[in-house]
Image (cartoon, helix red, strand yellow):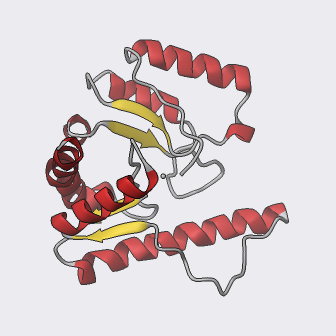
Amino acid sequence: MSRVAEGADLVWFTEHHFVDDGYLPSWTPVAGAMASVTERVRFGTDICLLPFNHPVRLAEDLAVLDNLSGGRVELGVGIILSVLVTDDRSTDWPLVRAAEKYRMALYQRFFDESGEGFGDPADAIPQTWIVGDVQHCVDELKRFIDAFGITDIVTMAVPPGLRAEQMSTSLEGLFKEVVPRVKAQMQA
């Protein structure tokens, strides 16, 4: 995990509760462990579910983590775009697409149980991923940054239901090729 994190600027952790598929319910201990083996990567949430956190406890946990990490903690309460770097979209995208369908079905269950609803069941799952080769991802990220004035991009490292090794090639391409090119273009 630390080898991938070394090339990243920011690692955001998910927070999901009462889910049986390995989603992370408590991200601060994991971020603390990662902070102990890295020196510059920042840590945050994608997203912190504020209603599930006592405000004082959350503030205290974040303050401790921020001190332990040398000021590298950020609190995320929104959800910014994901990137799949692949030279073979026809093979790699269906796995991620299936994970997205699973995630949306899970969210549907949450909303059904809450009685709030989750939109029209006939609505298509939104395309919130940039999917393509290195140059396509660079071009799309730059277009997104230019359009919205973004300073940090958040991407889902491992969609629910997939194993980390299924995404390692994409993550390496993202952090070793795409991100450096985007940074270079933004600084030019």
Using the image, determine if residue 105 lies above or below residue 123.
above
Can residue 157 be seen here?
Answer: no
Instruction: Please report the residue visible at 32 percent of the width from the left and 76 percent of the height from the top.
Output: 93
Q: Residue furthest front?
A: 188
The image position of residue 142, as x and y in percent, is 29, 57
Q: Is residue 14 left or right of residue 69?
A: right
Using the image, determine if residue 169 lies above or below residue 33.
below
The image position of residue 92, as x and y in percent, is 27, 75
Which picture quadrant has residue 69? top left
Q: Residue furthest bottom?
A: 122
Q: Quadrant of the N terminus?
A: top left
The image position of residue 103, as x and y in percent, is 54, 66
Instruction: Please report the residue visible at 48 percent of the width from the left and 52 percent of the height from the top.
Output: 80
User: Between residues 55 and 141, which one lies in front from this camera angle?
Assistant: 141
The image position of residue 62, as x and y in percent, is 55, 22
Can residue 119 be seen here?
Answer: yes
Q: Is residue 185 left or right of residue 143?
A: left
Q: Is residue 36 left or right of residue 120?
A: left
Using the image, determine if residue 117 lies above or below residue 46.
below
Which picture quadrant has residue 11? top left
